[in-house]
Amino acid sequence: MAEVPPRVNVLGVGVHALNLDLAIGVLEKAIGRKTKGYVCVTGVHGISEAQADPEFRAILNGALLNTPDGMPMVWVGRWFGFREMDRVYGPDLLVEVCQKSVANGWRHFFYGGAPGTADALAATLQARFPQLQIAGTHAPPFRPLTKAEFQ
Protein backbone atom coordinates (compact mmCIF):
# COMPACT_ATOMS: atom_id res chain seq x y z
CA MET A 1 0.00 0.00 0.00
CA ALA A 2 1.19 3.51 -0.74
CA GLU A 3 2.03 5.84 2.11
CA VAL A 4 -0.64 8.48 2.65
CA PRO A 5 -2.97 8.82 -0.37
CA PRO A 6 -3.10 12.14 -2.22
CA ARG A 7 -5.44 14.89 -1.13
CA VAL A 8 -8.27 16.38 -3.12
CA ASN A 9 -8.47 20.16 -2.86
CA VAL A 10 -11.99 21.06 -1.72
CA LEU A 11 -12.09 24.87 -1.52
CA GLY A 12 -8.61 25.03 -0.02
CA VAL A 13 -8.98 22.02 2.26
CA GLY A 14 -7.06 18.88 1.41
CA VAL A 15 -9.27 15.83 1.89
CA HIS A 16 -7.48 12.50 1.48
CA ALA A 17 -8.65 10.41 -1.45
CA LEU A 18 -9.32 7.16 0.37
CA ASN A 19 -11.92 4.79 1.78
CA LEU A 20 -12.28 3.08 5.16
CA ASP A 21 -9.89 0.22 4.37
CA LEU A 22 -7.22 2.59 3.06
CA ALA A 23 -7.61 4.86 6.10
CA ILE A 24 -7.10 1.90 8.44
CA GLY A 25 -4.02 0.87 6.43
CA VAL A 26 -2.51 4.34 6.73
CA LEU A 27 -3.13 4.35 10.48
CA GLU A 28 -1.62 0.86 10.89
CA LYS A 29 1.55 2.00 9.15
CA ALA A 30 1.72 5.26 11.07
CA ILE A 31 1.34 3.48 14.40
CA GLY A 32 3.89 0.85 13.39
CA ARG A 33 6.38 3.61 12.57
CA LYS A 34 5.42 5.63 15.67
CA THR A 35 4.43 8.54 13.44
CA LYS A 36 2.73 11.29 15.38
CA GLY A 37 -0.34 12.95 13.97
CA TYR A 38 -4.04 13.42 14.25
CA VAL A 39 -7.07 12.46 12.21
CA CYS A 40 -9.81 14.85 11.08
CA VAL A 41 -13.12 13.57 9.76
CA THR A 42 -14.45 16.28 7.48
CA GLY A 43 -17.76 16.88 5.79
CA VAL A 44 -19.34 19.92 4.18
CA HIS A 45 -19.74 21.72 7.50
CA GLY A 46 -16.00 21.47 8.16
CA ILE A 47 -15.18 22.77 4.69
CA SER A 48 -17.61 25.64 5.23
CA GLU A 49 -16.12 26.55 8.62
CA ALA A 50 -12.62 26.43 7.14
CA GLN A 51 -13.58 29.13 4.64
CA ALA A 52 -14.02 31.70 7.42
CA ASP A 53 -11.37 30.40 9.81
CA PRO A 54 -7.81 30.14 8.46
CA GLU A 55 -6.62 28.53 11.72
CA PHE A 56 -9.19 25.77 11.40
CA ARG A 57 -8.28 25.31 7.72
CA ALA A 58 -4.63 24.91 8.77
CA ILE A 59 -5.65 22.29 11.34
CA LEU A 60 -7.50 20.28 8.69
CA ASN A 61 -4.63 20.62 6.23
CA GLY A 62 -2.07 19.61 8.88
CA ALA A 63 -3.77 16.33 9.77
CA LEU A 64 -2.06 13.01 9.22
CA LEU A 65 -5.41 12.01 7.73
CA ASN A 66 -8.34 14.20 6.75
CA THR A 67 -11.01 11.72 5.78
CA PRO A 68 -14.05 12.39 3.55
CA ASP A 69 -17.00 12.21 5.94
CA GLY A 70 -19.75 13.08 3.53
CA MET A 71 -20.75 12.20 0.01
CA PRO A 72 -20.06 15.69 -1.39
CA MET A 73 -16.37 15.16 -0.49
CA VAL A 74 -16.48 11.79 -2.24
CA TRP A 75 -18.18 13.25 -5.34
CA VAL A 76 -15.45 15.90 -5.65
CA GLY A 77 -12.76 13.25 -5.27
CA ARG A 78 -14.31 10.99 -7.86
CA TRP A 79 -14.72 13.95 -10.21
CA PHE A 80 -10.93 14.38 -9.92
CA GLY A 81 -10.46 10.70 -10.85
CA PHE A 82 -10.14 9.00 -7.47
CA ARG A 83 -12.55 6.12 -8.17
CA GLU A 84 -11.80 4.22 -4.93
CA MET A 85 -12.60 7.25 -2.77
CA ASP A 86 -15.56 6.60 -0.49
CA ARG A 87 -17.11 8.06 2.62
CA VAL A 88 -15.16 7.44 5.83
CA TYR A 89 -17.82 8.00 8.47
CA GLY A 90 -16.22 8.96 11.80
CA PRO A 91 -18.03 6.42 14.00
CA ASP A 92 -17.23 3.61 11.54
CA LEU A 93 -13.56 4.63 11.54
CA LEU A 94 -13.47 4.68 15.34
CA VAL A 95 -15.02 1.20 15.62
CA GLU A 96 -12.61 -0.25 13.05
CA VAL A 97 -9.64 1.34 14.82
CA CYS A 98 -10.82 -0.05 18.16
CA GLN A 99 -11.13 -3.55 16.68
CA LYS A 100 -7.58 -3.31 15.28
CA SER A 101 -6.40 -1.89 18.59
CA VAL A 102 -7.51 -4.93 20.53
CA ALA A 103 -5.75 -7.23 18.07
CA ASN A 104 -2.57 -5.13 17.94
CA GLY A 105 -2.28 -3.73 21.47
CA TRP A 106 -2.73 -0.09 20.47
CA ARG A 107 -3.59 2.37 23.23
CA HIS A 108 -5.98 5.32 23.11
CA PHE A 109 -6.21 8.73 24.72
CA PHE A 110 -9.49 10.61 24.25
CA TYR A 111 -9.17 14.39 24.24
CA GLY A 112 -11.75 17.11 23.96
CA GLY A 113 -15.46 17.67 24.17
CA ALA A 114 -17.64 18.97 26.95
CA PRO A 115 -16.79 17.88 30.52
CA GLY A 116 -17.52 14.18 30.85
CA THR A 117 -17.80 13.47 27.12
CA ALA A 118 -14.36 11.90 26.69
CA ASP A 119 -14.91 9.81 29.82
CA ALA A 120 -18.31 8.64 28.56
CA LEU A 121 -16.83 7.72 25.17
CA ALA A 122 -14.02 5.80 26.83
CA ALA A 123 -16.50 3.91 29.04
CA THR A 124 -18.75 3.06 26.09
CA LEU A 125 -15.85 1.78 24.00
CA GLN A 126 -14.40 -0.14 26.96
CA ALA A 127 -17.75 -1.89 27.41
CA ARG A 128 -17.90 -2.78 23.71
CA PHE A 129 -14.21 -3.77 23.51
CA PRO A 130 -13.22 -5.06 26.98
CA GLN A 131 -9.58 -5.55 25.94
CA LEU A 132 -9.27 -1.97 24.65
CA GLN A 133 -6.37 -0.16 26.29
CA ILE A 134 -7.32 3.39 27.29
CA ALA A 135 -4.38 5.49 28.47
CA GLY A 136 -6.58 8.34 29.64
CA THR A 137 -8.97 11.15 28.83
CA HIS A 138 -8.94 14.93 29.09
CA ALA A 139 -11.51 17.60 28.34
CA PRO A 140 -9.81 21.00 28.43
CA PRO A 141 -11.87 24.09 29.25
CA PHE A 142 -13.80 25.87 26.49
CA ARG A 143 -11.56 28.92 26.49
CA PRO A 144 -8.10 29.69 25.19
CA LEU A 145 -5.57 27.64 27.11
CA THR A 146 -3.14 29.44 29.38
CA LYS A 147 0.55 29.26 28.56
CA ALA A 148 1.05 26.63 31.30
CA GLU A 149 -1.88 24.52 30.04
CA PHE A 150 -0.71 24.67 26.45
CA GLN A 151 2.69 23.09 27.22
Image: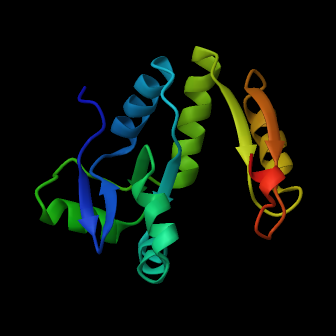
Residue in the picture at 73% in, 26% down: 132
- The quadrant of the rendering that contains the N terminus is top left
Q: Residue at x 26, y 51 (%)?
A: 85
In the image, residue 129 above or below residue 102: below
The one of 148 and 135 positioned closer to us in this rendering: 148
x, y percentage for residue 148?
83, 51
Q: Is residue 35 positioned above or below 5 on the image?
A: above
Question: Which of the pair 61/145 is nearer the observer?
Answer: 145
Farthest-out residue, bottom: 52
| Above-or-below relation of 151 to 113 | above
Q: Nearer the viewer, residue 50 or 82?
A: 50
Quarter of the image for residue 124 reads top right
The reply, left or right, for residue 105 in relation to residue 114 is left
Of residues 77 and 32, the one drawn nearer to the viewer in this rendering: 32
x, y percent for residue 24? 43, 34
Q: How is the image coloured?
A: rainbow
Q: Residue at x 78, y 61 (%)?
A: 145
Q: Position of residue 57 (x, y in %)?
A: 44, 68
**Quadrant of the image for the C terminus?**
top right
Res. 125 image quadrant:
top right
Name of the residue lying farthest toward the right: 116
Residue 105 image position (x, y, % from top left): 64, 16
